[in-house]
Amino acid sequence: MEGIIAERRSYVAGKWVEGEEALAVENPADESHVADVSVTPLSEIERAVAEARDSFDRGGWANAPAAERARILYAFLEHVESSRGALVATMVAEAGQPAAFAERAQLQGGLAVARGAIDLYLSMSHEAANPVPVDDLVRGRVALSVRRHEPVGVVSAITPYNGAIVMALQKIVPALVAGNSVVLRPSPLTPISSLVFGAAADAAGLPPGVLSVVVEGGSAGAELMTSHPAVDMVSFTGSTAVGRRILAQAAPTVKRVALELGGKSAQIYLDDAVGRAAAGAVAVVAATAGQACVAATRMLVPADRKAEALDAVSAAYAKLVVGDPVDPRTTLGPVISAAQRERCERFVALATGHGATVVCGGGRPSGLDRGHYFEPTVLDLPGNDNPAAQEEIFGPVISVLGYRDPDDAVRIANESPYGLSGQVYGADTAAATAVARRLRTGAVNVNTVVFSAYAPGGGYKQSGLGRERGTDGIRAFQEVKHLVIGELR
């Protein structure tokens, strides 16, 4: 495999910046040292915000024709794609993701969503006549009423470790094409891959200050980016606990906040689709090791077929190849850290302490003494009040619950503080769709799945605020202005 990205510095307002401190990046597959990355000084993160503010207020990028912004961003994405070999190697090394997932889901999937977002933006109307009753027009002597969508301003984008590239692309590209200036802060666990965006900004000719990429090992920089009065919006993907803190940090300056947070999504199998359960269970853990906020980690099946589903899922998990993500045979790599593996262990213990049964897995795989590996695990839960059904574990653990009838399945699925995603499977598509319509969640996949620039995603309840992708994802980075124009009398 090609060597990883060579850059180790932050990119601030058109220049590469080196700090005095270093952040050590670990390979979760073997606990080896990947590289030291220069930490952005807090003063430079503040300068990134100030330069973003200045670049936006001067209007060179925000007021440029949309077609010109699109041209530069297409070139930006071409540079990212040209770095494919080193970028994939970096994602494998710092995130422990199998190479096929890093290339197809993260890079190619992210690029497709980013290019689609540009196309979608160009197809949308951003200024249109606003309907006003005739009486209001006459009384107010109104000649024209216009509804206008304008860029929100300076955006702080904070991304997670499990999707550093794809999550960044679905934030920064819609924000940039809409005319905003962006400061990107990747997870301290996987910072190297995101440095490709600084090189791409240089190569494409993005004006200085329009995009900065900063690196830190703690949270002081992120807190500055979420509280600074010069920032107009925060776009964050990560845990619900951190999302709550971001809301509090943004509140004093009343920023716009977009949050994609935790999930405990349900996959519901109607009686005529239980045979599909094994494949659905594999999709939860394969490639991502269960580290996906949309992962449908609660499997709901008819109670009288629960034993059948448990057998099928356990047999499928026994065939998964757990190991080094560099090996093309590997289907499940490590979780990101020792702390995350310990979290998986803790929740398996909590689940069994509340009456669950471990059907397969439940610990560290034999023969893998180094690396943060956890076996693909199937839990038979007695009820939805079990900790493993209510809390996001973020590891290769799936919980199987039985339901009496479709009404009971809907009740169980909705009995959660989260509502990010969901799945319903049924040979009778109309019946499956009827169940899907009743789920309190931001997206529901019925017998299929789609990830597209044109399809919005986001959470209900404690799974977040706002939407990414789709027209709603574009509008999230815009303010609405009403222009009313009349003749001077």
Image (cartoon, helix red, strand yellow):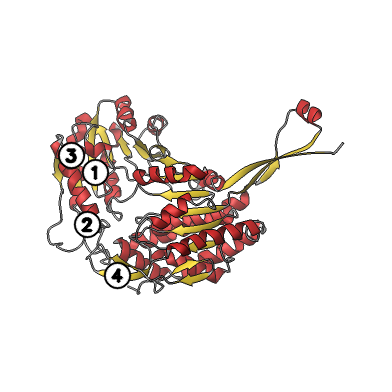
Q: For the residue carrying disc 3, how many other residues have a C-alpha within 10 Å: few (<14), some (14-19), or many (20+)?
A: many
Tell me which label, 2 or 1, sits earlier in the chain.
Answer: 2
- The mark lying in front, picked from 3 and 1, is 3
Q: CA distance from mark 4 to mark 3?
A: 35 Å
Question: 229 or 355: nearer the eye?
Answer: 229
Q: How many residues crowd mark 1 within 10 Å: few (<14), some (14–19), many (20+)?
A: many
What residue is disc 2 on?
338
Residue 9: where, in percent of width, then height? 42, 70
Q: Dot 2, how many residues are within 10 Å of its Cα: few (below 14), some (14-19), or many (20+)?
A: some
The answer to whether mark 4 and mark 3 are in CB contact below 8 A is: no
Q: Secondary structure at mark 2?
A: helix
Front residue (pair 430, 163): 163
Nearer the observer, 61 or 449: 61
Labels 2, 3: front one = 2
Lower sequence index among marks 4 and 2: 4
Tag 3's secondary structure? helix
Q: Quick check: 8 left or right of 199?
A: left
| Relative image position of residue 43 (x, y in whole percent) | 46, 63
Q: Quadrant of residue 168?
A: bottom left
Looking at the image, tell me whether mark 4 or mark 3 is earlier in sequence order: 4
Estimate how packed mark 4 is, as few (under 14), some (14 to 19) or many (20 or more) residues with alpha carbons within 10 Å.
some
Which labelled disc corresponds to residue 351? 3
Placement of 17 over or under 402, stated as above or below: below
Mark identifier at residue 398: 1
- Which of the marked residues, 2 or 3, is nearer the chain's N terminus? 2
Per the image, the residue denoted by label 4 is 34
